[in-house]
Image (cartoon, rainbow, N blue to C red):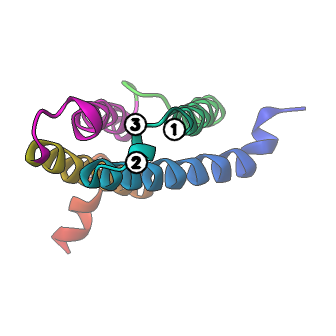
Amino acid sequence: MNAAAFYPQIKDLHIAAVIASGLLFASRGVGVQRGARWAMAAPTRWSSYVIDTTLLVAALMLCWILRQYPFVDAWLTAKVCLLLVYIVLGTFALQRGRTPGLRRGCLLAALCVYGFIASIALAHDPRGALLWLRG
């Protein structure tokens, strides 16, 4: 059977993983800000790894099915580059930030980047939400 036949299911899985990943990251970030132990506990971290691995595998499958690739298609290149920024900000928001203020700022910045990545995905354009701001 052709993998393209499963495109709708793979896309739905990818979208669900995007939402789950963002919600888990945001809740962990708030938990870290409040000093909650569960936010950095092993089960929570492993849940994040499982969700993010699912997200990545689904993304790679979609690239393969659609024949659209990062560093070939501008909107996917923008998503990958911003994903790296999101990951770095996320590590500072959850553990590497030395002060609560730095962790809070990185959390807010990471969530903004997350939202912009989602807008790029919806627009299939590297300008993402900036297209809507132009009117």
Q: Nearer the viewer, residue 16 or 35?
A: 35
- In reply to whether residue 82 is colored magenta, the answer given is yes
How far is the residue under mark 3 from the one under mark 2?
Answer: 22 Å
**Sequence-first tag of 1 and 3:** 1
Q: Secondary structure at mark 1?
A: helix
Residue 3 horizontal side relative to residue 32, left or right: right
Tell me which corner region of the image, top left, top right, bottom left or bottom right, holds residue 129: bottom left
Q: CA distance from mark 2 to mark 1?
A: 8 Å
Name the residue rendered at 78%, 43% in the picture. Answer: 6
Residue 134 belongs to magenta span:
no
Residue behind mark 3: 76
Labels 1, 3: front one: 1
Instruction: Find the magenta span and give its range.
Output: 73-100
Query: Mark 3 against mark 2, which lies toward the viewer?
Result: 2
Q: Which residue is mark 1?
A: 48
Measured as percent of width and height from the top left, residue 99 is found at 10, 39
